[in-house]
Amino acid sequence: MQVQQPVRHWSDIAWFLFFAAVLGLTCGVAMGGVALLLAAPAYGAESASEPGLLLRAQGSEACLSAPLVSTDVVFQVSGPIARARVIQTFQNPRADWYEGVYVFPLPENAAVDRLRLRVGERLVEGEIRERAAARQVYAEASRSGRRAALLDQERPNIFTTSVANIGPGETIVVELEYQQTLRFDGNRFSLRFPMVVGPRYNPAGPLRVSDSDRIAPPVLRPGSEAGRPNPVSIRVELEAGFALAGLQSPYHRIDVQSPSASRRIVALADGPVPANRDFELTWSPAAGEAPQAAWFVEEKQGRHYGLLMVLPPAPGKGVRLPREVIYVLDTSGSMAGASIRQAREALSLALSRLTPQDRFNVIEFNSYAQALFTEPRTADTEAVRRAMRWVEGLEARGGTEMAAALKLALRGDEASAHVRQVIFLTDGAVGNEEELFKLIQARLGDARLFTVGIGSAPNSHFMTKAAQLGRGTFTYIGRVEEVKSKMSELFAKLETPVLHSLELKWPDAARAESWPARIPDLYAGEPLVVAAALAKLEGEVVLSGERDGERWQARVPLTPGSIGSGVGSLWAREKVASLMDRLREGGQEEEIKAEVIQLASAHRLVTKYTSFVAVDKTPARPATDALKSAAVPTLLPEGWEYDKVFGELPRGATDSRFQLLTGLLALLLGAALLYVRRRR
Amino acid sequence: MSGGVANRVWLALLALLLAAGAWQAGRGAWIQAKAFFAQVLIAKAWSRTLRGETQVRPWPWADTWPVARLSVPRLGIDRYILEGADGSAMAFGPGHARGTAGPGTAGNSVIGGHRDTHLAFLREVKAGDVIVIERPDGVRLTYRAGRPEVMDRREVWVMEQAGPTRLTLVTCYPFDALRAGGPLRYVLLAFLS
């Protein structure tokens, strides 16, 4: 006992010292940790309040002082034709004279045939000129202080309005009008109005697109758009031509008035909306009301312009051929957020649809493309499950190297026993469309390419043209709730036989020139749409095609038909598109350019080679005042993630210290508790 | 009796606390150990690269390979740079951002790394310090460090390729923050001399 006493004593002292040291250390470290943890958010706050809210490359100063733009759109819909008047109001809040440059989207098949500049009460009508000549006229007016407006086409669905000499505090209005054929598919008409050009990815390297700066308006960083929502108001006056059964706007709340069974007046329910996503309006005929054929005619300068729309009978359920399906998923930064969720959902639905007689593969691409399997595999349960797991784990970030993915998917090899279908899920946020189209054309072989446009602002030019060249079809998914219905429609198209070898025979006397020259295959629910210029209206046009080995034929008499104002513009627009297709196929640029310019001048159309310019007569800006120029910033499309689109600097930190610290703290606390217990 | 139950609960909680502490500390230590020992393995892969092999994976399942060797003579620093400035490569070494010029080639070569492992030395680098890059072909180039800057992670313009040949070394800031994921970056440019 007595021997033990001092030992006990010593161990007590040791324990006490240890305990004191531990307690001191714990408190010190904990306080230090708390201080550091509290310090971290403070750093964050500091950086958020830094100036330069916009992309540095764009020049933040210029962006924030750019004129404000608001847009009013009025649609007049008559059957399958829509005429839109887009009123862009440029308001200069500054005390300097400004030029405003606004990059905005329109539907990919819009025939822009009118531009007016409104200054106060004065209206100046725009003229069509060759692009370079129009720019010169505009620049001259701009220099001499006169107000002027210029409208250029950058892509079939991207346009630029430039307005010069907007005085301090002044408002200038630019009105443009366009004509458009509406899409009819799956017993539903749809009118789509895009509002924002999402940031586009332009690959670097030798194939770099030269005009990337023309299609890249500065983008407001979320949170900094206060006071600059680029508001858009929309009104649609709809005369469907048949009794309506349903009318929907999937992305915006609308107010609808119904003056008659076939008429509707639609307006946005909550007033102007921010220009950050496509507006869509769809309507369907009441049962038995859908016309099987429609023929609209406009007489212009001694020629008859006709628009023909024929809906072939629905296909029967054909024999289900074994398919080889290649799913391609865009996992680039622009897909981050809502888009990738929609795409993943759509893809897993598509995967679940495969049967063991099919073969499949999945390709994902961002800065690189990679395939799940090296070769397409039989779609047995195991493979499909593996694919689903893989897709579930994919994240969206990085660039959009679409060419690499297309090369993996389209190998241009010979047909096998399987029908090869490529399902391409993307938002199409690229600027090198032409390069991709050429690639599709060169490597398609016997495959068919189907595009699925994902997200709130898909690139409609890419979706429709890629599908056309890929001899497939396109669909849009703008919300996760739509995935099921839209994908079911796509499956119906993939799994039922197409109507192919379509031909039109016009009466000789009509001397018809109809576009498109080569009529695409028709999938379930799709109508044939052709625009024609005719010398005479007589006889009938004979349509024929083949489906599942059976001939199909229809005749439509060429009567004066319904009056379709603006059909001439539609015809010219369709012809321009066909000419541009020919250019891609290797046509002579000089020849095609001349033909487009001639056509565009006759029909007053904005094209790649022709622009509208309007110049006010009287000089407004005193020669002593300087003119500043600014690009109108746009919003980030809804659901997109800024950081994922514009990237960020590499992250360079681990949690190792935090883990070591908290781990050691826990260990020390445990040891301390153990000591306390032993003492008791 | 009830004392016995309380005792057992007490013991169980204690064991849990100790286990959690060991787990957490172990994870932290594992990150540091990986960062340290990987560089040793990569050294071997680098010597094979210098002998003419390309894309030498330091271990069979690696999805990255050394692309350059960076040293700062004044600080006695030596690091093997891996391909890819993403988390999976940067666990083992500083990563070269894909799409930017390769280290030691014309343009802007962006290299990212963790501030608490491989690039912790950046805070010690002073303007004018010599940074040496050894390329896969054995050529050694000398760069001179400029002044470091702290910027927001969204300032991606520093990754632009135009301009003089340079290294852009990026790590997180502040160096002493406990947690990862802050918005600030510490950026050091070094120009070919």
Image (cartoon, coloured by chain):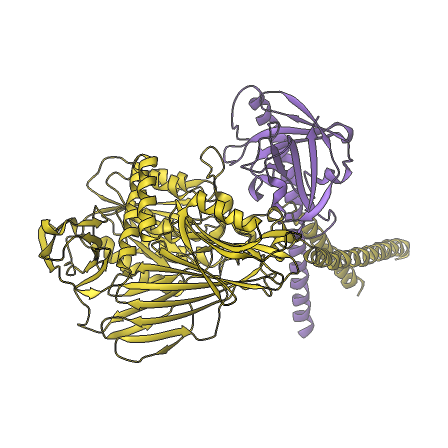
Hey, which quadrant is residue A579 in on the image? top left
Q: Residue at x 64, y 39 (%)?
A: B35
Instruction: Give x and y (percent) for residue B178.
Output: 71, 52
Of all residues shown, which one is farthest toward the front?
A618
Q: Nearer the viewer, residue A514 or B137?
A: A514
Whether residue B1 appears in this view of the structure is no
Indicate left or right for A492 with A141 as reference.
Answer: left
Colour assignment, chain A:
yellow
Q: Nearer the viewer, residue A66 or A623?
A: A623
Instruction: Give x and y (percent) for residue A368.
Output: 46, 40
Instruction: Give x and y (percent) for residue A602.
Output: 31, 50
Q: Is residue A90 above or below residue A142?
A: below
Q: Is residue A311 above or below residue B60?
A: below
Give the number of marks. 0
Q: Nearer the viewer, residue A507 or A554?
A: A507
Position of the C terminus of chain A by quadrant = bottom right
Hey, which quadrant is residue A259 in on the image? bottom left
Colour assignment, chain B:
purple
Indicate left or right for A494 with A612 as reference.
Answer: left
Q: Is residue B129 above or below residue A182?
A: above
Instruction: Give x and y (percent) for residue A187.
Output: 24, 65
